[in-house]
Image (cartoon, rainbow, N blue to C red):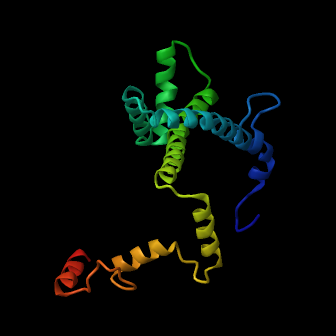
Amino acid sequence: MVLGLDFHVIWDNLTYFFIGRYPHGPLGGVGLTFYLAVVSCILSFFGGLILGLLAISRNRLIRYPSEAVIQFVRGMPLIMVIFWMYFLYPNLMGQPMPESQTVILALTFFTSAYMSQIVKAGIEAVWACLTYNVQLWIRLRWRRQWATSPARRGHPRIERQRSALQGGGTRGRHSRPPGKSHALRYAAIR
């Protein structure tokens, strides 16, 4: 007994906390949690890939409804999605559904909405690289400069832009020195 607390209850039921009544009943505890997490992550990978591809479609009849579903699901708490799946899905399908499958479906649906945004951002980033004609050797040179830089600064163009926005550092030929009006505008922004 430590500090007047009795931990024998936990030690006596440790297998129940990990696997529930598994050999003689359903899986429970930590085992059920890992099962739900792994299965829903695998399914949400494919769901997110499909929803992400639908979200970048050029056809508005496909893109707008998929974006509406994604934003609707992302705007709801997970507990609400589980609640809807538990009560709404059996009423729509006309047959009951086991609780573990309901939670897997809700987690898959919820996580797919978030993963679709990852897929969409990745594809748009590739298109942005191709649009701005970023060549492989430029990206590799920038990575080499960044890795060898003692201060680990960013790309030189980004550094010039950052320093110009902060009001110091090197100035381009089109920028004028800060005057009184610039200082007043800068003070008003702060």
Give the x, y percent position of residue 92. Answer: 47, 16
In the depicted structure, whether residue 160 falls above or below residue 180: above
Give the x, y percent position of residue 95. Answer: 55, 13
Which residue is rendered at x = 61% and y = 69% of the image? Answer: 141
Would you say 139 lies left or right of 20 here? Answer: left
Would you say 31 lies left or right of 185 here? Answer: right
| Closer to us: 127 or 185 | 127
Give the x, y percent position of residue 34. Answer: 70, 42
| Closer to us: 167 or 136 | 136
On-image quarter of the N terminus: bottom right
Which residue is rendered at x = 40% and y = 85% of the image? Answer: 169
Would you say 94 lies left or right of 75 here? Answer: right
| Closer to us: 113 or 7 | 113
In the depicted structure, whether residue 131 falls above or below residue 53: below
Which residue is rendered at x = 62% and y = 63% of the image? Answer: 137
Quarter of the view holding residue 7? bottom right
In the depicted structure, whether residue 176 falls above or below residue 102: below
Residue sitting farthest toward the right = 23
Quarter of the view holding residue 177? bottom left
On-image quarter of the C terminus: bottom left
Quarter of the view holding residue 57? top left
| Closer to us: 74 or 84 | 74
Give the x, y percent position of residue 74. Answer: 44, 42
